Amino acid sequence: MGSSGETYVREMAIDPAARAGETVRARQHRLLAALRPKVALFAELRLDWAAHEAAWDALTRFCTGPVRAHLCAADQALYAPASVGAQTRLLVAALRASGAQLGGRIETLARTDEAEAAARLAYGIEALLAAHLAVEHDVLLPALAALPGVDLPALVAHFATLLDQGGPVARRTVLAAA
């Protein structure tokens, strides 16, 4: 008899929904892993003016680029299908509200010219994004997998395609509030 860890690994190798969830988790992890040092570089280190401006610019571009792209791709590929289920409608509304909060903070970060305010925004974006991504993975994906007729691996493949292609996702700037 194998350990519970072995059983989990064996089930992951077989279960397409579990593999899809891990695909999303890996993308979320990479997103946060790329954001955190940008926040730290900008907000925590004492840099000369030029380096500080470059760190601020890199942070802003990352938030307006990959972070926003993730939010939009998730909305299109995951939230939209979940929004039709009675069991998941309120969850999607909460995720869209959280995404709108993130979008608003990102817009404010992009417009602000005060370093202290930008640092507070950066920390807030990092914390809110971490919580938002946890709800996506830990609550939304299992709820989607439980909906009748939902092909979670296909939805996650669409999500990954949207992120990999950029395209329409990159041009979309506002998440609709449900």
Image (cartoon, rainbow, N blue to C red):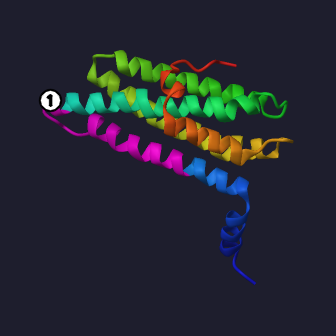
Q: Picture quarter containing residue 126?
A: top left
Magenta region, main secondary structure: helix
Q: In the image, 31: left or right of 143?
A: left
The residue lying toward the viewer, choosing from 177 and 39, is: 177
Q: Quadrant of the C terminus?
A: top right
- Is 47 covered by the magenta stretch? yes
Q: Which residue is mark 1?
A: 50
Residue 54 x/y as whole percent: 22, 31
Q: How many marks?
A: 1
Q: Picture quarter containing residue 144?
A: top right
Residue 55 x/y as whole percent: 25, 33
Residue at 14% over, 29% down = 50
Q: Quadrant of the N terminus?
A: bottom right
Residue at 53% over, 34% down = 70
Q: Amino acid at mark 1?
A: Ala
- Residue 55 visible to an observer of this rendering: yes
The answer to whether 111 is drawn above or below residue 80 in the figure is above
The residue lying toward the viewer, choosing from 126 and 54, is: 54
Residue at 48% over, 32% down = 166
Q: Picture quarter containing residue 3?
A: bottom right
Residue at 63% over, 39% down = 158
Q: Residues within 10 Å of mark 1 (few under 14, many from 20)?
A: few
Residue 30 x/y as whole percent: 46, 48
The residue lying toward the viewer, choosing from 91 and 176, is: 176
The residue lying toward the viewer, choosing from 32 and 128, is: 32
Query: Considering the numbered disc 1 on the image, is that residue within a helix, a strand or a loop?
Result: helix
The residue stretch that appears in magenta? 26-51
